[in-house]
């Protein structure tokens, strides 16, 4: 009885294996794909969202260019000796102005895709990346200068301070453009195989793309966000703690513009940096990967990147509404300009009247 039972069980399994072989041969066995090997095709933004974003970028451009020119003019033409913080703010204004010049190209790209070719893709990406580094490094230098002046009561020679600050600014520009060189890997490529829409994006064609991307992202996260942010938080925490123990409010007023500029920078750039860190962790297989997550992170990168571009027009507004010292300097410059125009106008009228009198005497 036992033997017959075993034989019947063996016969049943044979039928099962024959059926399994048949389904394999007929390609009817269920296939579970690897999500990392699936093509995750991106789609262009909705027309309404693209138009709204385009209008925001154009408005930012129209505010940023004259605003930064005004701030640069006020700081650069000041008759008083510039402090190191003023020098750093002046160079920060230059960086924001350069950033603003890229906004019309970004606006067209949002609506129609990238239409300007590989060279402009590399150049504008280089400008944006360099501004990304220099802006936060200049803000870190401002925080260190405020710490030295308020906490350490630094009394080094002013001419030596100005020379050192100018040399440091030149070094920061060189470092920022050097760290931005990986932007030269950006090329104009198709959004996906089924679309003719072009985008300006990374295209690593030397060695391992993953390795290149992780190395460049590492420099971006360390030198473009984490290290300067640590310096700013440390210096301003100590500085504010010292100010809270002082009785006078002169130093408090001097800190308002600086703190407002730093907060504005963090509100604009921190979301983009955090999203970029998440994207890097996904590419390094630290975070789980799936197509829906990939699309969400890509959409978040686009949104936070455009939020970061708004930073180029915010600092002039902060100077105008928060900086009492800046407003006084601006009013003095306008009054001086009006006096010069009146004096030149009065000289012109006197010379005209003298000429007419001379002609009358001759006649």
Image (cartoon, grey):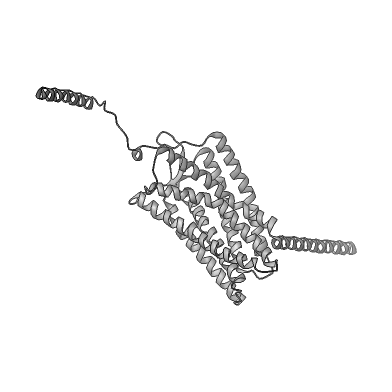
Q: Nearer the viewer, residue 318 or 296?
A: 296
- The x and y percentages for residue 138 are 55, 62
Which residue: 70% across, 63% down? Answer: 325
Q: Nearer the viewer, residue 159 or 30?
A: 30
- The x and y percentages for residue 341 are 77, 61
Residue 301 appears anywhere in the view = yes
Residue 141 occupies which quadrant of the picture?
bottom right
Judge from the rendering whether residue 176 lies leftward or rightward of residue 6; answer left or right: right
- Farthest front residue in view: 1
Residue 50 occupies which quadrant of the picture?
top right
Which residue: 55% across, 72% down? Answer: 164
**Is residue 87 positioned above or below 117 on the image?**
below
Judge from the rendering whether residue 165 lies leftward or rightward of residue 289; answer left or right: right
Q: Nearer the viewer, residue 5 or 234?
A: 5
Residue 186 appears anywhere in the view = no
Label tally: 0
- The x and y percentages for residue 188 are 44, 44
Q: Quadrant of the C terminus?
A: bottom right
**Is residue 242 positioned above or below 212 on the image?**
below
Q: Quadrant of the N terminus?
A: top left
Which residue: 59% across, 45% down? Answer: 57
- The x and y percentages for residue 292 are 43, 37
Which residue: 51% across, 61% down? Answer: 230
Q: Nearer the viewer, residue 129 or 112?
A: 129
**Is residue 150 positioned above or below 203 on the image?**
below
């Amino acid at each position: 009885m036992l033997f017959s039972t075993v034989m019947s069980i063996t016969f049943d399994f044979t039928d099962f294996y024959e059926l399994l072989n048949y389904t394999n041969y007929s390609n009817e066995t269920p296939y579970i794909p690897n999500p990392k090997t699936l093509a995750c095709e991106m789609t262009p933004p909705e027309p309404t969202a693209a138009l709204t974003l385009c209008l925001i970028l154009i408005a930012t451009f129209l505010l940023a260019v004259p605003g930064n020119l005004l701030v640069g003019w006020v700081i650069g033409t000041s008759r008083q000796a510039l402090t190191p913080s003023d020098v750093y703010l002046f160079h920060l204004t230059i960086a924001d102005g350069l950033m603003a010049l890229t906004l019309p190209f970004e606006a067209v790209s949002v609506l129609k895709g990238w239409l300007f070719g590989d060279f402009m893709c590399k150049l504008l990406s280089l400008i944006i990346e360099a501004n990304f580094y220099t802006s936060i490094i200049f803000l870190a230098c401002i925080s260190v200068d405020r710490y030295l002046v308020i906490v350490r009561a630094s009394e080094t020679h002013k001419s030596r301070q100005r020379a050192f600050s100018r040399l440091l600014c030149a070094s920061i520009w060189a470092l920022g453009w050097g760290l931005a060189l990986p932007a030269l890997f950006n090329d104009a490529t198709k959004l996906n195989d089924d679309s003719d829409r072009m985008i300006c994006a990374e295209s690593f064609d030397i060695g391992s793309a993953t390795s290149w991307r992780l190395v460049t992202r590492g420099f971006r996260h360390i030198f473009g966000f984490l290290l300067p942010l640590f310096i700013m938080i440390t210096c301003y925490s100590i500085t504010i703690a010292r100010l809270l123990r002082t009785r006078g409010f002169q130093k408090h007023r001097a800190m308002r513009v600086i703190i407002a500029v730093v907060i504005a920078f963090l509100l604009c750039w921190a979301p983009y940096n955090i999203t970029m860190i998440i994207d890097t962790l996904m590419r390094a297989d630290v975070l789980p990967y799936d197509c829906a997550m990939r699309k969400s992170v890509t959409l978040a990168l686009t949104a936070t990147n455009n939020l970061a571009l708004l930073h180029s027009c915010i600092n002039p507004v902060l100077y105008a509404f928060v900086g009492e010292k800046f407003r006084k300097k601006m009013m003095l410059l306008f009054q001086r300009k009006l006096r010069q125009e009146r004096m030149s106008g009065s000289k012109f009228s006197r010379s005209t009247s003298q000429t007419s009198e001379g002609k009358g005497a001759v006649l």
